[in-house]
Amino acid sequence: MRHSSLFIALALLLVSAVLLSGCAGTARGSKSSVFGSYDEVELIDYSLSRADALVVIRYPAIIHADAEQPYFHAFSINAIGGEVPPANRTKKVTTRIAQSVIAKSNYYVMSLYRELQQELPENTVLLSPHIILWDKDRGVYSRPILATEQIPSVLTVDFNVYSYPDTTALMDSPPVTFGDLVTPLFVVQGDRWLQPATNGLLLASDPMLKTAWEQSERQADGEIARKLSGDLTQDQRPLDFVAFLNRRSAGITALPVKAVGSSRLQVLAVEEYPVEKIQMDGALLESLSENFTVDPFAESFVKGAAARITRALNEVSHDRATFFARQNALARFDPELAVAFLARSGGESVRSRLQLAEALIEAERKFIAAQSLSIYDGTYLGDYGGKMRQMIEGEYRLLENRRTAARKANVTTAVAALALVGSLYAATASGAVGGIALQSFSGILVLGSLWAMSSTLETRAESAQMSEHFLALIAPALERQISVQMEWLESKERISAIGFAEFRNKTLTLYQARVRSLQGQYRDNCVFRHPGFTAAGRWYGTCREGLAHERGYGVIRDETGNSLEYLGTAASGMASGTGGMIARYSRETGAFYFEGDFDRGVPNGVVLVEEPGSRSRIREFRAGKDVGGGAADELRRLSF
């Protein structure tokens, strides 16, 4: 193959360069991840809704031209693994490393996607590539390119790989993704109701723990503020890694944390994933560009991480985790139905609307699942994936030569190879892949020329539409027509569209043509009260004389930032009967959850209690006061 011969020439060149320059040094990583000990886990799914996704995987896919320099700057000054000397922060190679993080994240995330897709039910694992943006008010942030995050999902996984910005330390201890070394960073989180004690945050990489916590806390506060104002729209959370680069969260202390795989797994705390520089199996990298049937990254990290994600799916209530995301999704079709859904009405007119709306959301999920598969095919199986494998294989051989030499020297060769990953990304992002990164190697004779060549490959991603070009390149099938069969009651209908916007227009049209009028009144502005709050809150559901009554959802917040959410039955404007309540206090870390019997706004009877840093427990309450242990068989659970 033409590429193979070029690559052999590159490998020989790199070997010669090492010998000529006297390069030596070691770069080792851990042979196994902390997730390596996890056994395979089979999913147990008792979800009531068929519309939900199980996992959404978010990752940085592209940088907008306006965000490049702010991103490069943030990357250089917020290094993970050490402090970068000021003189090294502005070097051009630092921008190459910053680009390589995006390029390699695009590639390695596909291993996690493929593993989960194979283990979980069809069309339940979705990709959400993000574009990195910047403006003067928000700084560096990201937003999803596809509509993936509008689909209700049980878990959301943020994933990317990382390399330390300072090239002078490339062969030493700091985290790096180069050759057979991979440093994964990821966060597992969900809706605040998934695990109220931690605002839905389940697991986070050590450096990003405080940022992820702050993001989850801010997301919960934002949802409460929107519900109080009657706004049923959904928040778009930027990638935690990008938020970390934009602004480190140093002020948060005493978080409820537990180690990954510890004996405290039942404790309601965030699992802290350490920074791991994982060394993949070299035997699988020897001919990676020719044979990638066995994925070395999957063997060393992904299978264990995917098993942990599946275990998390088994540990949480899917209906509780997706309830409010489903409500937000329903609001796009029918705001009146969204309010009736919060009231969990059992009326026939509500049920028929809900069945149709959820069938259409399920169809949207299948459409995005097809888009996700197209992205995988284009990124991992297509030209982009082929070039990345050649690059990784070349980097591995370079490292092996340096390890053999085992002498410390300059790292120019490694820097040049790493810079070429950034060049590949830059060329790809501007739609100019065409073999440029590989073809240029044929004219290189000496080490200096290698670096000179790579440094001339300037980023040409200056178009405001660069994300579209990038996706069109890595996933040529993304713009093809996709057809999805929707099943509703006894009927089946096939919906076809090119692009999600057209697909959603068709689903909305179909819904509006078939809806029936709702029977009963479901309001979103009745009064909800709690004895601990002087201000009145808002109730979504049924009312009596303007006060919360029967089933619905109530939210309240005071001027100090204390807030309370309640889902269940009410009487005379206050929680009364069976329900679930989340209480947040401005001076407390995390939230407190109570589920069971209530009377006059407070727990009264047998109640499940969850709080940060403790295991769930069943207690007996009288008029809001804990009087001792409760009987599990007397606990009445909230029905979602």
Image: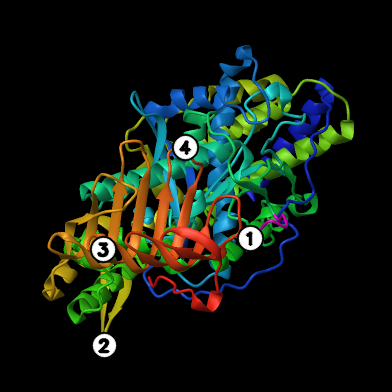
State the scheme by which the image is colored. rainbow
Kind of residue sitting beneath label 1: Gln
What percent of the width, then of the height, locates residue 103? Answer: 54, 40
Magenta-colored stretch includes residue 432: no
- Going from the N terminus, do you reach mark 3 or mark 4 first? 3
Quarter of the image containing the C terminus? bottom left
Q: Which residue is mark 2?
A: 490
Q: Disc 4 designates what residue? A: 587
Q: Is residue 117 above or below residue 269?
A: below
Q: How many neighbours does mark 2 have within 10 angstroms: few (below 14), some (14-19), or many (20 or more)? A: few
Tell me the residue at 65%/21% (across/down): 83
In this view, the mark in front (1 or 3) = 1
The secondary structure that dominates the magenta segment is: loop
- What amino acid is labelled 3 in the image? Leu
Residue bearing mark 3: 330
Are there few (<14), some (14-19), or many (20+) residues within 10 Å of tag 4? few
Label 1, label 4: how far apart the Cα atoms are? 25 Å
Q: Position of residue 561 (x, y in %)?
A: 36, 38
Q: Residue at x 49, y 77 (%)?
A: 634
The range drawn in magenta is: 261-265
Where residue 574 appears, as percent x and y from the top left, is 28, 60
Which secondary structure lies at badge 2?
loop
Alpha-carbon span between mark 2 and mark 3: 22 Å
Q: Is residue 415 above or below residue 584?
A: above
For residue 306, which quarter of the picture?
A: bottom right
Number of callouts in the render? 4
